[in-house]
Image: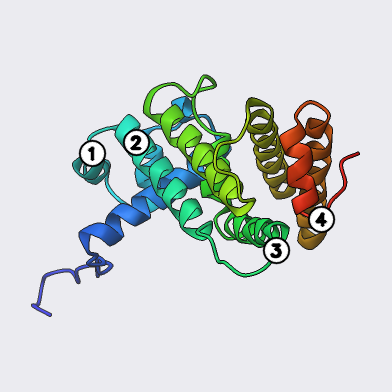
Amino acid sequence: MTPGKPAERARPARRRLTVDRRREELMAAALELFSRRDAEDVSIDDVATAAGASRALVYHYFGGKQELYVAALRSAADQLESRLRPQLGGSPLQEVASGLTRYFDFVEEHAAGFAALLRGGPANRAGEVGEIVDGVRQRLSRRIQKQLGLERPSPVLRATMRAWIASVETAGLDWLDHRDIERPTLERMLVDQLVALLGAAARYDGDVGRLLEVLGERPA
């Protein structure tokens, strides 16, 4: 140390991250915030602070809060969909049950992303945000229909499947809030709910009744 000069305070070493890794960190921080507060109430400064980054860096990667919000939700949607890729083997209902297990694996491991995807942001879910959320639901519905051996569902069956998917989403959010029911129990209950909904739909659509017979279930 040079005489007469005060010792300089050591600065913490800055982590050198790849562009993709830095973007992932910023999106993860944003999802955590968006899962607990409406997007309108989260600022770029909030995201920067949560990620341990500068405000300028967030703008550099995303341009603004709306771009960050959309990118974060799209990332969560992509991760969820990757979990739901079919894994053939077993009866149709067993495949649905297996898909539910993978769905709730995502809910448990990526709680912030799941909650932000379904609960955060503008109430009307307009524009790109609405397209992301609705796109996940539509692809999930098509995958389940394929697992059940359906090519073109009737209007009654389409409405029934959409109602069941809404139940699965609501159950996921409720489980995150309370966690007072065992996951396997919840998953079995949701499969039973699907069968019950199909049973109700069969009274209005004979094709649904025939589907239940194929699944080994009798219409109510």
Q: Which residue lies under the disc numbered 2?
A: 44
The CA span between labels 1 and 2 is 8 Å
Of the two numbered discs 4 and 3 on the same chain, state the one appearing first in sequence: 3
Image spot of residue 135 (x, y percent): 46, 37
Which quarter of the rendering shows the N terminus?
bottom left
Q: Is 155 drawn above or below residue 56 in the view shown? A: above
Q: Amino acid at mark 4?
A: Gly
Mark in the foreground, 3 or 1: 3
The outermost residue toward the left is: 2
Q: Are marks 4 and 3 in contact (CB under 8 Å)?
A: yes
Labels 1 & 2 near each other (Cβ < 8 A): yes
Q: Earlier in the sequence, mark 3 or mark 1?
A: 1
Look at 43% across and 41% down and name the residue there.
73
Q: Residue at point 68% right, 46% down?
A: 172
Q: Nearer the viewer, residue 101 or 20?
A: 101
Residue 151: x and y in percent read 55, 43
Q: Earlier in the sequence, mark 4 or mark 2?
A: 2
- CB atoms of marks 4 and 2 within 8 Å: no
Disc marking residue 192: none
Residue tagged by mark 3? 91
Instruction: Provide the residue designation for mark 1.
Output: 59
Q: Which mark is residue 216?
A: 4
Colour pattern of the rendering: rainbow
Local packing at callout 2 (Cα closer than 10 Å; few below 14, some 14-19, many 20+) is: some
Rate crowding at label 3 as few (under 14), some (14 to 19) or many (20 or more) other CA atoms within 10 Å: few
From the viewer's perspective, is 166 left or right of 59? right
